[in-house]
C-alpha cells in the first residue's frame, strides 16, 4: 500500500510537470509561470483575450527632428521600442548600441534623432549634426550618443569635441560609440537582461534564491532549473538576479549561457 501511494504521488507530480511544460511551450514567454504542487492540469476550455490585452497600449511615436526611413533609405533597418516609445535606427551598429543603452540600469528613457546640433569646425565653417540616440538617465543626466563605424571614430570624435566644447542646455555631454563598444557577448547578455525584466515572476525569484542558497557558494546556470529541465520563468528569474548582482558570473566578459558558473551573492 505504501509503495502504491508513493507511485501514485509520483505519477501525479509527473502529470503536473508535463502540464506546466506544455503550457509554457505553447504560451508566449511572458505568460510562463512557475510550476507548483497545487497547479491544476490543463483545461480544454477555450479562453478569450481582448484585442487591448493581447496587443497592449500603442507606443509613443519617434518624434525626432528627422525620420531615418526617409533620409537614409539605403541604411534604414527599422524601429525598436523601449518603455513604450519608438526608437528609430538606421544601421546594425545603432541596433547594438541601442540595446546596450536599453539594458543599462541607468537608462530611464531612450530617444532617437532628437537634436540637430550646430557647430563650427577648425576652419570656422558651420555644420549641423543630428544625434543618433539620446539617453535620459536615472541620475538626472542626459547623454547624447553619436554612432559610427570604428574606422570613422577619429572623424566623429572631432565633431563631438566641438559639440561638447560649445555645450547644449538640454544635454550634459555627448559620447562616440562604435561597433567595438558592443561586442557580441555584451549584446547577447543585454538582450537576455531586457527579456528577463519583462518576463520574471516573483514566485520564480523566490525559488531561484532558495535553490541557490542550498547549492552553496557557486552553481552552474542549469542547476537552478528543476532537475535541469528548461523553464521560461525560471530562466527569466536567473537572468534578472544576475543583473541585480545576486548571482555573479565567474567570468564577467563572456556571454552567459546555461553552463556558465555563477557565484552566489544572495542578499536574503
Image: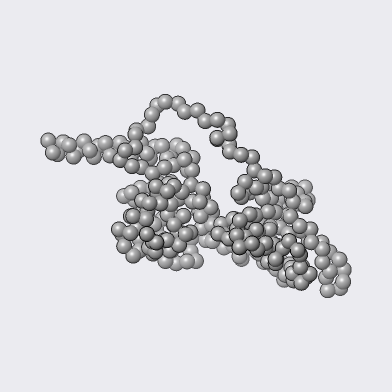
* Residue 238, percent from left and from top: 42, 54
Which of the pair 85/232 is nearer the observer?
85
Q: Which quadrant would the N terminus be assigned to in this image?
A: top left
Residue closest to the eye, 259 or 46: 46
Image check: 147 left or right of 106?
A: right
Q: Is residue 60 visible?
A: yes
Q: Residue at x 38, y 51 (%)?
A: 206
Provide residue 104's location: percent of width, then percent of height.
57, 59
182 or 110, which lies in front?
110
Residue 26 drawn above or below residue 231: above
Q: How is the image coloured?
A: one colour
Q: Position of residue 91 (x, y in %)?
A: 68, 55
| Residue at 47% from the left image edge and 59% from the top image edge | 244
Q: Which residue sits furthest left? A: 1
Residue sitting at the far front? 140
- Direction from residue 126 to residue 58 in the image, left or right: left
Where is residue 237? Give x, y as percent. 43, 52
Q: Residue at 83% across / 70% down in the picture?
A: 121
Q: How many marks?
A: 0
| Residue 188 in view here | no
Taking the spot 61% from the left edge, 66% from the top edge, the residue there is 180
Amino acid at each position: 500500500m505504501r509503495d502504491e501511494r508513493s507511485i501514485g504521488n509520483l505519477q501525479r507530480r509527473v502529470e503536473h510537470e508535463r502540464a506546466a511544460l506544455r503550457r509554457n511551450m505553447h504560451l508566449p514567454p511572458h505568460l510562463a509561470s512557475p510550476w507548483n504542487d497545487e497547479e491544476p492540469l490543463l483545461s480544454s476550455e477555450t479562453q478569450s483575450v481582448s484585442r487591448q490585452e493581447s496587443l497592449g497600449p500603442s507606443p509613443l511615436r519617434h518624434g525626432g527632428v528627422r525620420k531615418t526611413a526617409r533620409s537614409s533609405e539605403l541604411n534604414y533597418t527599422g524601429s525598436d521600442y523601449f518603455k513604450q516609445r519608438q526608437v528609430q535606427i538606421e544601421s546594425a551598429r545603432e541596433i547594438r548600441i541601442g540595446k546596450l543603452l536599453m539594458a543599462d540600469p541607468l537608462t530611464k528613457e531612450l530617444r532617437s534623432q532628437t537634436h540637430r546640433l550646430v557647430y563650427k569646425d577648425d576652419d570656422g565653417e558651420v555644420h549641423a549634426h543630428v544625434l543618433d540616440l539620446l539617453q535620459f538617465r536615472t541620475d538626472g543626466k542626459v547623454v547624447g550618443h553619436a554612432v559610427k563605424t570604428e574606422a570613422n571614430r577619429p572623424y566623429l570624435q572631432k565633431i563631438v569635441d566641438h559639440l561638447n566644447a560649445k555645450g547644449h542646455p538640454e544635454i550634459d555631454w555627448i559620447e562616440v560609440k562604435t561597433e567595438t563598444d558592443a561586442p557580441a557577448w555584451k549584446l547577447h547578455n543585454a538582450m537576455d537582461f531586457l527579456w528577463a525584466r519583462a518576463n520574471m515572476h516573483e514566485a520564480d525569484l523566490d525559488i531561484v534564491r532558495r535553490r541557490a542558497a542550498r547549492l552553496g557558494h557557486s552553481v552552474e546556470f542549469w542547476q537552478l532549473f528543476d532537475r535541469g529541465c528548461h523553464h521560461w520563468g525560471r530562466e527569466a528569474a536567473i537572468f534578472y538576479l544576475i543583473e541585480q548582482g545576486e548571482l555573479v558570473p565567474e567570468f564577467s566578459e563572456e556571454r552567459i549561457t546555461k553552463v556558465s558558473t555563477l557565484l552566489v551573492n544572495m542578499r536574503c
